[in-house]
Structures are given as C-alpha cells and as structure tokens.
Amino acid sequence: MTAKLISILAVFIMGGISALGYCGVAAMMAIESMCIPLPSEVIMPFSGFLVSQGRFTLMGITLAGSIGSLVGSALAYWVGWWLEKDYLLRYGKYILITSHDLDSAERFFSKYGDAAIFFSRMLPVVRTFISLPAGISRMDFKKFAIYTFLGSIPWCLALGYAGKKLGDNWETLGAYFQKFDVLIVILLVIGVIWFLARHSELLKEKLRCRK
C-alpha cells in the first residue's frame, strides 16, 4: 500500500471507530476479514490509543475486534463454500486450477486446518484471505469459527496493547508492520511463480489452443 492510500484508509477507520465505538471496532475488523485489505495494523492500534484516552477498555476492544474478525471471516468462508467444487472445476481451468489442486487443498485443511486457521489470524495479509480457501475446501465450520476467534484474540490484544502504550504515537506501528506485509507479499509472489511453473504444461496447452 502506498502512504497516501494508507492515509485515506486511516481516516476512514478512525472516523468509523470514533462514531460507532466498539461496534465500529467490530465493523472495521469484519471488513478486514472479508478479503478486503483494510489494515488491522491501523484499526487495533488506534483503538488502543482510545483506550489510553479512557474511551475504551483493552478487553473491550480485544473482544470487539475478535468478534468482528469472526463475523467477517465467516462471510468469506460461506462465499467460498457457495462457489462449490464443480463450479471451480468448470471455470478454474481458466486460471490453471485443477481437480488435483482442489483435492490437495481439501486434504490440507482436513489435516492441518485447525492450526492453519489459528496461526494465520496472527499473520498480516494471510489473515485477510485464508477464509476463502477454507470455505472452498469445506473445512468444518464449527472448527473454523472456534480457531478463527481464538486466533484473533492474541492479534487484537497485542495490537491494541501496543497502541495503548504508544499513545499519540500509535501510527508508528502501521509503518512497522508494512515491512512484514512486504515480506509476505514477496512470499506469495514466489508461491504464484511456483504454481505457474508447476502448471507450465497446462499453460502451454492453453496457449496452443488460442493460436
């Protein structure tokens, strides 16, 4: 994200939280968890700053943020569920998604889904998008909801506490976490390159068909 875009988002976030209180915290975190990159690295530290001003309590913003994360993640999960495997098999070929990929994703979430969902809630970028593939893979929703909520608590608490301690300087956290965002985006790009290399034959076949 550019500094200008972050500034615009920060104004939106601060306005929403200032106007709606705890409901604003929950709403902003719900948006962030719906595969919409609204940075929790701004939402929770600003909420923590308001704790230092006596408007909120630390436990209050942690609970509100975690509930918002659960609500937004659940919506993204059900969007993934709604897509259905047959739909993805029909249209996924256009972006090189195969039945093998979907079967592998299902096996992954079946075997490691609990840990993946829990720990992903504490990772920038990943926490925003993990719900969609979990829904597509038909991960058990009850487990998904439990581990989403539990994983969101330490993330919201840590960012809120840091914002409280920093007080008026809470905005410095956003710049700090941007470094992690860049690292994770680089890793995701590497993953995309690996995916394309693994599907190179399918890509070549598609290109031949277009000629």
Image: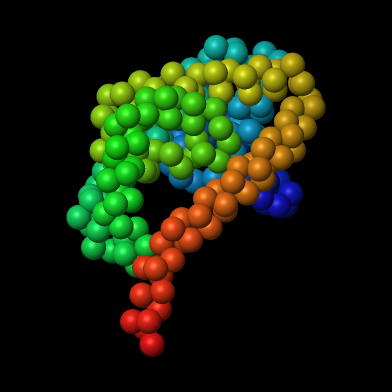
Q: Residue placed at 29% from the left, 40% from the top?
A: 106
Position of residue 182 in the picture relative to residue 116 (left or right):
right
> Which percent across, then down, holds residue 177?
69, 35
One can see residue 66 in this view: no
Which residue appears farthest toward the right when viewing the image? 169
Find residue 140 and report its image quarter. Answer: top left
Position of residue 141 in the picture relative to residue 25 (left or right):
left
Position of residue 103 in the picture relative to residue 129 (left or right):
left
Is 95 rendered above or below residue 79?
Answer: below
> Which percent across, then down, holds residue 71?
38, 31
Q: Residue placed at 63% from the left, 23% from the top?
A: 159
One can see residue 127 in this view: yes
State the quadrant of the C terminus: bottom left
Is 112 rendered above or below residue 57?
Answer: below
> Which percent across, then down, holds residue 156?
56, 22
> Which percent across, then down, holds residue 186?
62, 49
Position of residue 60 in the picture relative to residue 87 (left or right):
right
Q: Residue placed at 31% from the left, 64% from the top?
A: 93
Q: Residue placed at 79% from the left, 25% from the top?
A: 168
Find residue 205 and report its image quarter. Answer: bottom left
